[in-house]
Every structure is written in structure tokens, then in C-alpha cells.
Amino acid sequence: MSDALSAVLSDVLPRNATAYAIGFDAAERENLMRLAGAAHLTFLDDAEALGDALDVVLAGPAWEAAFTGFDSTTFTDRLARLDVALRPGGTLVVSVANVHSSAELLTPAPAGRGVFDADGVSYDTSRPASASALRVALEQLGHAVVNVHEIYGGEERWCVLGPEAATMTREIDVLRRFVSRAIEADLRLEPVVPVEQFVGRLAAADALSTAATSFVAVCGGRGRALYAEDGAGHVQWLDGSIHDASWAVGGGSDAIDARERPFNVPVARSLEAQLLRDIAAADTADFRLTAQRIGTWVMESSSLNGRRDIDWRDIAWDGERVAALWTTGIDESGQEGIERDVLLARGWRRFAARVRVLEPTMPWPATLSDDELLRLWLSMSGVPDERAPELIELTSEDSPAPATDAWTQRYALEEASDRIVALEHEVAALHETLRRRDGELAVRAKAIRSLRGQVLSASRNRDLMVKANADIKSSASFKLAAQFRKAALVTRPKTLVREVGKAADKRVRSLRRLR
């Protein structure tokens, strides 16, 4: 029995009722006994041993193999037989493998894989291939309330979406992130398309459950909204309804102080989604406010104690409250967490790498490098300018390693081509600017030369005029004319008196100054 199924059963099994389990092997039975208690659990190997009016019926992963001797040839026939054994109001738990999982399309496989099915499972059209199909099958048997949990991933990493979380995956990208990580960890080959994009498209089409590994239907009970393995072997959960603005959070490692965990977290879009929305809208003012809020939260939040890494895709923000939905990235070895500004720089470094892959049209120049973008965003987050270069240097080796799959390399090639085009445009613009400035400088130089010629010509003309004036004053004709002008004053007594008076007054004034 998988850890995912164990997580669901631990919450839906009634504690004081006798349960009949069918379809579990020896190892799974031991695990189930630890969950429910041996005194209240009866294991059956054959469907013929099922009685009537049972309180709890558990159908494990191999429950259909117990119907070998029956005439039940379809899935719905076998499901109806299970339902007959249950009393009204009892609890029925059915585990169903999704043999048509669309997640298998992520990796290259032979075209005929899964077609040659000796048992005819793949040809059974009554077998549900989605959570809604399984829910309808049980509702047709008379169950009014059916909670179908969708299990994604494998043994290494998995997640379980309850009906509430599955409904909200179309809008909440943080919930889709759990599914993406679980599916990606279960792949043995490089995916032909990015897993995150694959999951996003399925969720947008309301078909995400088709990628599930299996389903667990619960009639007469309810599990939590979401379970997930955090990458360190610990099971964490979220619980709430689709009408709640925040969900309760629990589980995880006992090594983490409960006081450092939030009791509930906002169920909202991630910080990355908000930042990308601001970039797409070229709303730099809103982007700056969001970055400032991120910086304040990272520097002050106690929920980040001990954390050594952070990703904006895992952080939910409802416009008022920022919270990490998971404790992934917390070091349980007892070491102290890194400095908060370094943690902030690592988050922005990851976001810069994501921007290069997603290629949004940014309001900043396309020629800016990752380090230049990181410096800009750190400044928006409130990091002092003198500290930013050191943080850039410290996180320079934290950039995610380039993926080797063809899809990522194609994006990298397109990004490099776009940057080359942007640089060519920038160089062309600089050449045009220099050409215009050269023209303007040529015009100015011509005007300066013209003005210089005019100044030199005026200076030469002035020198000639001064020399001509001196020559005239020193000539005999000028002197004779001066004598005639003085002699002419005798014939004009009034003018003579006035000139003599002026000369006398001038002489008197000069004498007074000498005293």
C-alpha cells in the first residue's frame, strides 16, 4: 500500500467499527493494521467471502483480482458487488488505478504500450479514467456524497488532491505545483514537454484528474483537502473548503518547532504569478510594491527560520498576507538558517531563471543580464545598494543547472536568439545616434569656422581703420583744418566766449583736484 493511500485511510477509517479489507497484500495488511488496529480489521482474499450489511468495506489496490470467479466482467459490475456488501450509511473506500493516465504521455514510449492487455482492463469502457467518472459511478449506486481523492506521482514523491483542492487547481497555481513536483519525480525519462506546463493546461481544461496515478473514492467519510510528501519523507496536509480564504496546515517533521509554522495559510495564487502578471501588464509600480512586500516578509517572518532556500512559486499571497504553504527547504540538521537577505537574493535568483524560461515581455531592457535584474529587484525589496553586489556574488552559484531536455534547450536557444536580436537593435540604435550626432557636430564646426572668419575679418578692418585715422590726424591738411576751426571762433563771439568759459572751468576744476 502506498504512503499516499495510507495518508488518506488514516483520516477516513472509522475508529470503532469493524472493517473488511479486500485487495491488500501481506505488506499492505501490516501497514493497514497499524492504521486501524488488528481488533477491528478483517482481511478477505475472495469476493465470495463478502457478507452483507457491513459497516466498513476497504477495497485495496488489487481488489478487482478477488472477483476472478465471478461473472462480473466490467468494472461497474464489480463495484456494484462491493456496494451490495455495505450497509446503508456505512463507509466504503475504493482504490482504483488509472490505467489511462495522461501523465504517461510525458515520456517517449512505444505507440502500442498498454494496448496489448491480456486481462482486457484497457478495453473496459466502464472503467473510470477521471475523478468525476468514478464519482458518477458511485452516485449511480445510490451514494449521495462521494469524495474522490486523486493520487499523483509514485513512491519517491506524491501528492493527494481532495475534492476541494482539485476544484481549485484551475485558479490556484500553488496547488498545481504539488502535482507538478509529484509527477516530475516519478518520471524515469526526460519529459517531452515541461511538466508544469502540461499540468497547467490540463487544469485549465478541467481535466487534471486524467493525469492521476490512481483514485481513492470515499463514501461515508471525508479526508483532508490535500496531502503531500515534502521530499524529506514527511507527510504534510492542508484542509479547508472552497469557500475558505485560508486553509489549516499540519503534519511534517517533528524537528521543526510548531511555533515557527503558520496554523493556517491563504489559499491564493503564488508570488510568482503576481509578479508575472505585473510584468505582463508593464505595471512597474505594482511590481515594486510587491517586491517591497516580499522583502519585508522575508526579513521579518518567523516561519522562515531555518530555511536555506525559497521559491516564489511555493509562496501564496492573497494581496494582504504572504505565507509559505510548505516547510520544504528547512534544514533539519540543526544548522542555523542563512541570513535573510541571502535567502531573499536566492528567491530572486530563482525568479530570474524562471523569467528566462517563461520569456514574458518585460518593461525593462531585454539586454539586462540576470545579475543586473537581480540588483534591480533587490533594490526594490529594500536591500541597500552597497549590499547588493555582495549578495549577487554569494548567489551566483545558486542558479539552477541548465536542463538537458530538448524542450528546455529549445527555449534556451530561442532566448539566446531573442537577446542577440535585441543587442543588434541596440547597436543599430547607437549607430543611428552617433550618425546624427556626427551630422550635428559637422554643422556646428562649420558655423564656428564661419564665425571665426568673420571675427578675423572684423579685426583686420579695425586695425586698418585705426591706422587710417592716425594717418589723417597726423597729416598737414588735418592740422591746417584745425587751425582754421580755431580762427573761425573769432567771427562768432558767443561761441568763442562759450569755448573760453568751458576751457576756464575745466582748468579751475583740475586745480581744485590738485589741492
Image: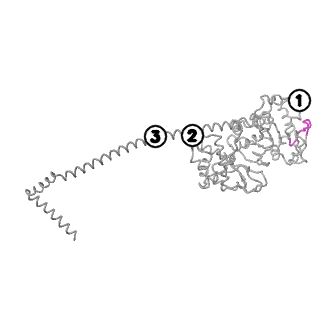
According to the picture, the residue beneath numbered tag 1 turns out to be: 71
What's under tag 1, amino acid-wise? Asp
What residue range appears in magenta? Answer: 44-56
- Examine the rendered structure and indicate whether residue 498 appears above or below residue 277: below
According to the picture, the residue beneath numbered tag 3 turns out to be: 436
Residue 52 magenta-drawn? yes
- Residues at marks 3 and 2, CA–CA distance in whole angstroms: 20 Å
Q: Which sits earlier in the primary sequence, circle 3 or circle 2? A: 2
Residue 505 lies left or right of residue 222; in this view the side is left
At x 61% / y 49%, what residue is drawn? 377
What's under tag 2, amino acid-wise? Leu
Secondary element at image label 2: helix
Q: Position of residue 119 (x, y in %)?
A: 86, 30
Residue 439 lies left or right of residue 473; in this view the side is right
Mark toward the viewer: 1 or 3: 3
What's under tag 3, amino acid-wise? Arg
At x 89% / y 33%, what residue is drawn? 67
How many residues crowd around disc 2 within 10 Å: few (fewer than 14), some, or many (20 or more)? some
Q: Which sits earlier in the primary sequence, circle 1 or circle 3? A: 1
Residue 428 lies left or right of residue 509; in this view the side is right
According to the picture, the residue beneath numbered tag 2 turns out to be: 423
Instruction: In this rendered view, identify the residue nearer to me: 351 or 84.
Output: 351
Q: Position of residue 170 (x, y in %)?
A: 68, 40
Contact (Cβ within 8 Å) of mark 1 with mark 3: no
Instruction: In this rendered view, identify the residue nearer to me: 58 or 236.
Output: 236
- The number of discs equals 3
